[in-house]
Amino acid sequence: MRDAAERDTPVANRIVAGLPPDERERLVRALRPVTFALGDVVYESGGRLDHVYFPTTAVVSLLSTMEDGSTAEMGMAGREGVVGVALFLGGDTTPNRAVVQVAGGAFRTDARMVREEFARGGPLQHALLLYTQALITQISQTAVCNRRHSTEQRLCRWLLMCVDRAQADEIQMTQEFIANMLGGRRESVTAAARHLQDAGLIRYSRGHISILDRPGLEAAVCECHRIVNGEFERLLGTRAHPDC
C-alpha cells in the first residue's frame, strides 16, 4: 500500500460525504489515505482487524475460503460503504477474507477511533448500521444468485457491481480471478464472457474488460442487481452507481 493519489478525497466515499459537516470534519481528521493494487489483501480470515477502510476508487471483495482453497465472493464494497464491518459491530476478527478486486484509493482509520465514534450513537453510527443492513442484503442476495441463476447472469451482475463502484466502464480483471469471485469453473466464465462479447455487450482483451452496452447488460442481468441497488437506495439514499 502507498499514499493514495491526490485526486482521492474522503468525501468521494458516500458514507463520509453523507455525514453532517461537524461529524464529517471530525472523521476526516482521523482518516489516512492508502492505495491498493489489484489482489492486495486488506485482511485475512481470522486475522485481527486494526482498521476500518472507506474506499473511494478501490473495490474490495469479501471472500469465503473453503478448506480445499477454493473461494467464492459473498459481497463487495466500494465508495458506497466501508470495509471492516465486524470491527464496529464488536468483533476483532472475521472468518472471511477481504481482497482488492479493483485497484484504487481508500481512507482508513484505526479501530479505537471507530469504536469511540460508534459508541457515541450519532450520525456515523446510524450511517454504518444502515450500510450494514444493505450489505447483509447484498450478501444474502449473492447466495441466492449463486444457487439459482446462470453463470452468464451472475457475470452480468458482478460486472455491473464492479463498474458501479469503480466509476469506470473498464476494469482490469482476468477470467481466472472472476471465476474465483463467482465460485465457478474458469471454463464456464470464459464461455459466458465470450457470449457477452459476441452479443456486443462487453469487450475482453488481455485482462481488460470494457462495458460497451450497459443497457444491454442490465437487460441480461438477473433481478438480484435491481434488488441490491434498491436496498442501498432505500436505506442510504443512494445506489452504488457512478452517477449517484
Image (spheres, rainbow, N blue to C red):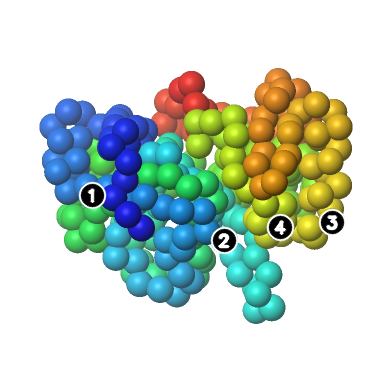
What residue is shown at x 50% (from left), y 31% (from top)? 167
Q: Residues within 10 Å of mark 2 (few under 14, many from 20)?
A: many
Q: Residues within 10 Å of mark 3 (few under 14, many from 20)?
A: few
Inter-mark Cα distance, 2 to 1: 25 Å
What's under tag 3, amino acid-wise? Glu
Is label 2 in a helix, a strand or a loop? Answer: strand
Residue 95 place in picture, x, y as percent:
50, 70
Label 1, on which residue? 32
Label 3, on which residue? 187
Inter-mark Cα distance, 2 to 3: 21 Å
Inter-mark Cα distance, 4 to 2: 15 Å
What residue is shown at x 65% (from left), y 79% (from top)? 67
Tell which circle, 2 or 1, labels the residue nearer the N-terminal end: 1
The mark lying in front, picked from 2 and 1, is 1
In which image quadrant can residue 184 be found?
A: bottom right
In which image quadrant can residue 111 be found?
A: bottom left
Taking the image as drawn, is residue 228 in sight? no
Tell which circle, 3 or 4, labels the residue nearer the N-terminal end: 4
Q: Are marks 4 and 2 in contact (CB under 8 Å)?
A: no
What's under tag 4, amino acid-wise? Glu
Residue 124 place in picture, x, y as percent:
26, 41
Label 2, on which residue? 63
Tell which circle, 1 or 3, labels the residue nearer the N-terminal end: 1
